[in-house]
Amino acid sequence: MDQTKRQPRRMGWRFAFLALILAVGISGLVRSLWLDVYFIPSDSMEPVLEGGDRILVSRTDFRDEPIRRGDIVVFDGRGSFAPLNSGKGPLVESLTATSQWLGLTGSDTTYVKRVIGLPGDTVVCCDAGGKLTVNGTALEEPYVFAGDRPSTQKFTAVVPEGRLWLMGDHRSVSADSRSLLGAPGGGMVPLARVIGRPVHIIWPLDRFAEVPRPYAAGPTTENGP
């Protein structure tokens, strides 16, 4: 083959490769600073989020606005919900991380739950009407999965400063703060471990929709109970 024909072809491949590297780099920057995509691996947040959903997560929402009771949050569960060491080999860890980054699979250390208790709150199950109470006031929870009770497990939890009490909406199948009352940290998740707030379901297309934020006003991590 003529050398003059080979050179443009090589330059074309190099350009395509550099463009791919640049696109991945920009995507990584955007996902680390502003937006990310997560795969929902379970049914614990039904009916709002279903297993198999891919959600767009805003990393900036809670930098500009404090966390409110009732918010859904994505968080790193290491040290609270998840084991500190998964025990996987380096190759498996690498492949798993790539799959999670692409939004193809869920993470065994990243969780999605709803904020029920803010720092300083006392969360109790349950009052005479079968509702959760926060600081003595019964919660109205329209997001709870149809047919589920707010909780079948009785508990009293005082949320320390800098932590959150989190529960799934599909209470009968959700492993959440209730399941970890006797564990280190008592099932409370540090505020510093919150990654962001789901803002949109992007897949499957027939579920393409905003993720509702039920409370526009009320207690926050800034103004307390």
Image: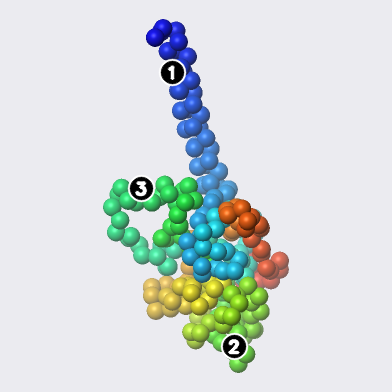
At numbered mark 1, what does the secondary structure look like: helix, strand or loop?
Answer: helix
Mark linked to residue 10: 1
Q: What element carries label 2?
A: loop
- Type of amino acid at the residue the image marks with label 1: Arg
Q: Which mark is in front, 2 or 1?
A: 1
Nearest the eye: 122 or 144:
144
What kind of residue is marked 3?
Ser
Closer-to-camera residue (122/104): 104
Q: Quadrant of the N terminus?
A: top left
- For the point 51% across and 85% down, the residue is 152
Q: Residue 112: where, in percent of width, then height?
A: 52, 64
Residue 136: image x %, image y %?
62, 85
Where's the C terminus, which quadrant?
bottom right
- Indicate the quadrant where residue 132 lies: bottom right
Taking the spot 42% from the left edge, 13% from the top edge, the residue there is 6
Amino acid type of the residue tagged 2 in the rendering: Gly
- Cα–Cα gap, marks 1 and 3: 31 Å
Tell me the CA gap for discs 3 and 2. Answer: 45 Å
Q: Where is residue 177 in the image (x, y as percent from the top left)?
A: 47, 74
Which numbered mark, 1 or 3, is in the foreground of this view?
A: 1
- Of the pair 142 and 119, the residue shown nearer to us: 142
Tell me how far mark 2 sits from mark 1, CA to CA.
70 Å
**Disc 2 or 1, which lies upstream in sequence?**
1
- Residue 65 vs 167, above or below: the answer is above
Task: Return the disc, 1 or 3, that comes first in the chain's sequence.
Answer: 1
Q: Decide: few, some or many residues near mark 3? Use Cα within 10 Å; few <14, some 14-19, many ≥20.
A: few
- In the picture provided, is 128 more to the left or to the right than 9? right
Residue at which label 2 appears: 130
Q: Residue at x 46, y 17 (%)?
A: 9
The answer to whether 106 is drawn above or below residue 157 in the figure is above
What SS does tag 3 mark? helix
Residue pointed to by mark 3: 94
